Amino acid sequence: MENTHIVTVKEIISRTHDVKTFRVTKPGNFSFTPGQATDLSLNRKDWKENKHPFTFTGLPSDDYLEFTIKIYTNPQGLTYHLDTIETGEEFEISDAWGAIEYKSEGVFIAGGAGVTPFISIFRYLNKQNKIGNNVLIFSNQTEDDIILKDEFEKILGKNFINVITRQPETNYYYGHVDKFFLEKEIKDFNQQVYVCGPDEFTKNILDSLKELGADAEMLVFEK
Ligand SMILES: Cc1cc2nc3c(=O)[nH]c(=O)nc-3n(C[C@H](O)[C@H](O)[C@H](O)COP(=O)(O)OP(=O)(O)OC[C@H]3O[C@@H](n4cnc5c(N)ncnc54)[C@H](O)[C@@H]3O)c2cc1C
């Protein structure tokens, strides 16, 4: 049986109009690798079994665990309820699991909340002064949807590339992360490419990358 842990919410930080960061207590000896996730539920009688995957966005060395969560409007959904909780609330979480981990320098492509595994990875690389030439291509509907914009700008500088799909007057690239865009932005398809986002987003990008000659084994994505 999978190990579970009860953690207490210590801090809630608003990130965008529909994204919040939750910092919770860290159980003794708990460990994760940047990019990994956990099954999380509210530690309330009727909610305990309603588990959903969320990614650790803090550093393994932090003395708290952190989640950065997009809130949806479905009143039956977990995230709708997460929007109303206060500090002192308890979550139940599983041990860490997940397929995304940093292997070598490359291009990270994220759609919306799909950026969460990359938050921990970039913070980790930055802390070790190993950010190198890694690139983040981040696709959002509008500029207001960009999670941790200032932090990514600071960590990545010109290697933080925003794509905006539904706000024509944006100062960023307006359009989609499609084959044309990938060919323009990625100089070397023989490097590590990490993709994370909604299923359709991930599938379309992987198809385009393969057509452009990227090695399928070099692609890392959450199935
Ligand atoms: C490995 C993994 C890691 C994940 N990590 C994170 C993370 O770190 N942070 C995070 O925010 N999410 C993460 N997710 C996604 C997260 O698990 C889901 O978003 C969450 O379970 C939704 O729960 P809910 O009950 O509130 O969903 P519901 O409210 O029932 O919504 C379910 C789905 O319906 C759709 N939907 C609902 N309302 C709307 C709306 N208004 N507009 C458009 N679509 C809508 C969305 O596709 C949504 O995912 C991760 C998923 C996986 C597989």
Image (spheres, rainbow, N blue to C red):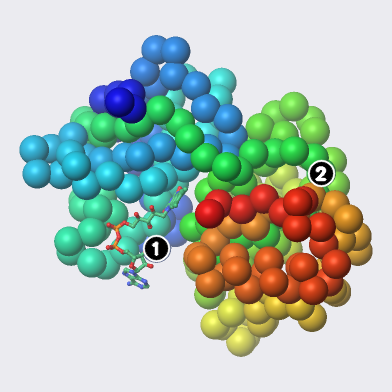
Question: Which residue is depicted at the point 76% across and 78% down?
Answer: 179
Instruction: Judge whether 83 appears above or below 42 on screen.
Output: below
Q: Residue at x 91, y 60 (%)?
A: 188
Q: Residue at 15% of width from left, 44% of height from top?
A: 47
User: Whole-percent x and y of residue 9?
Assistant: 29, 32
Q: Amino acid at mark 2?
A: Glu
Residue beneath disc 1: 17
Q: Relative to 44, say whether 82 is above or below.
A: below
Specify the quarter for ligand 1. Answer: bottom left
| Residue farthest toward the top in the current orientation of the protein | 28
In this orientation, which residue lies closer to the viewer: 52 or 21? 52
Residue 158 lies, with reference to residue 2, above or below; the image says: below
Based on the displayed image, in which of its 4 quarters is residue 138 positioned?
A: bottom right
- Image coordinates of residue 171 in percent, x first then y, are 69, 77
Mark 2 or mark 1: name the one nearer the start of the chain: 1
Q: Regarding mark 1 in the picture, which secondary structure is present there?
A: loop
Q: Amino acid at mark 1?
A: His
Q: Which quarter of the picture shows residue 28?
A: top left
Is residue 77 left or right of 46 when viewed as pictured? right
Dot 2 beta carbon under 8 Å from ligand 1: no
The tag on residue 194 is none
> In this orientation, does residue 57 appear?
no
Front one among 56 and 37: 37
Q: What residue does disc 2 label?
A: 105
The N terminus lies in quadrant: top left
Disc 2 to disc 1, C-alpha distance: 32 Å
Q: Residue furthest left?
A: 45
Foreground mark, 2 or 1? Answer: 2
Q: Secondary structure at mark 2?
A: loop
